[in-house]
Amino acid sequence: MSSLAASRAPRLHEPATATRIVDGAEACIRRYGLRRVSMSEVAVAAGVSRASVYNHFADRDAVVAAVLHRAAERFVASSEPTVRRRRTLAGQVAEAALFIRAHRGDPDHTVTPGGEELLATLLTVQTDGLIARWIDFWLPFLADAERRGEIRTDIDHRQAAEWIVRIMLSLAVMPSASVDLDNPAAVRAFVTEFIVRGFAP
């Protein structure tokens, strides 16, 4: 291959520009925080021009939203293997709540200086996006539960999924006056008794 042809060939191992920008923005957010990062700093971190950043993202808020969306996707995806190990909807919901509590402070799930929890960040900056993503996550679990006869056939799965997400997030981020939320058995019993039983036939 000639040097000219080689220069025109796609670089298969070089990430797409948009991905590089989001990578750079995440690095900047981890270093400076959500509100101090600038488009110029993102461009430098991504190794692209400032104009290139604006070609892919309308403004700074759009870049930050992309970083948080990807972080939320990463968090949800990382919980799926643990959730799928349970064979009932109650077990799956309880496992998701326990997973969140156990992994809230993991470095892989922080995006701001000092390791601020991803959930705290997402819930204050991008609540709608996080809830929508988790609603989609629960839809197939609800469909499976309906096929197993665990939930009524007249339940709106999307509304049920939103109920699960909202309660699950409260279990993860709010203290409890009556349940030991760090005790897996207590969480599973609580979920079965008060969260999922209302869906049953």
Image (cartoon, rainbow, N blue to C red):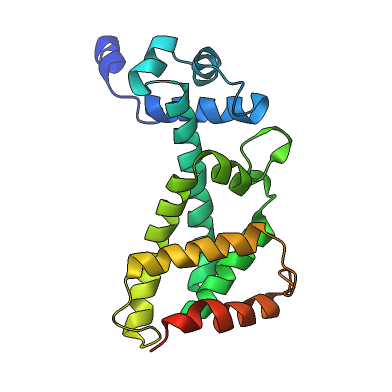
> At 69% from the left edge and 79% from the top edge, which residue is drawn?
186
Q: Is residue 1 visible?
A: no
Query: Is 31 located above or below residue 127 in the figure?
Result: above
Whole-percent x and y of residue 33? 64, 28
Using the image as rendered, state which of residue 158 and residue 134 is in the foreground.
158
User: Is residue 141 shown left or right of residue 126?
Assistant: left
Residue shown at 44%/34% (left/top)? 66
Residue that protrudes farthest toward the front in the picture: 177
Quarter of the figure with residue 156: bottom left
* Image coords of residue 8 (percent x, y): 26, 16
83 on left or right of 184: left
Q: Nearer the viewer, residue 97 or 3?
A: 97
Q: Quadrant of residue 168?
A: bottom right
When the figure is inspected, residue 6 is found, relative to residue 171, above or below; the finding is above
Q: Is residue 114 above or below residue 193?
A: above
What count of labels does the image hold?
Answer: 0
Q: Residue at x 68, y 80 (%)?
A: 185
Pinpoint residue 127: horizontal percent, then vertical percent.
Answer: 49, 46
Res. 161 in view: yes
- Taking the image as shown, residue 30 lies to the left or right of residue 4, namely right
Vertical comparison of 150 with 182: above or below: below
Q: Quadrant of residue 150?
A: bottom left
User: Which quadrant would the N terminus be assigned to in this image?
Assistant: top left
Report the quarter where the C terminus lies: bottom left
In the image, residue 163 lies at what x, y percent? Answer: 46, 66
**At 40% from the left edge and 69% from the top edge, which residue is drawn?**
160
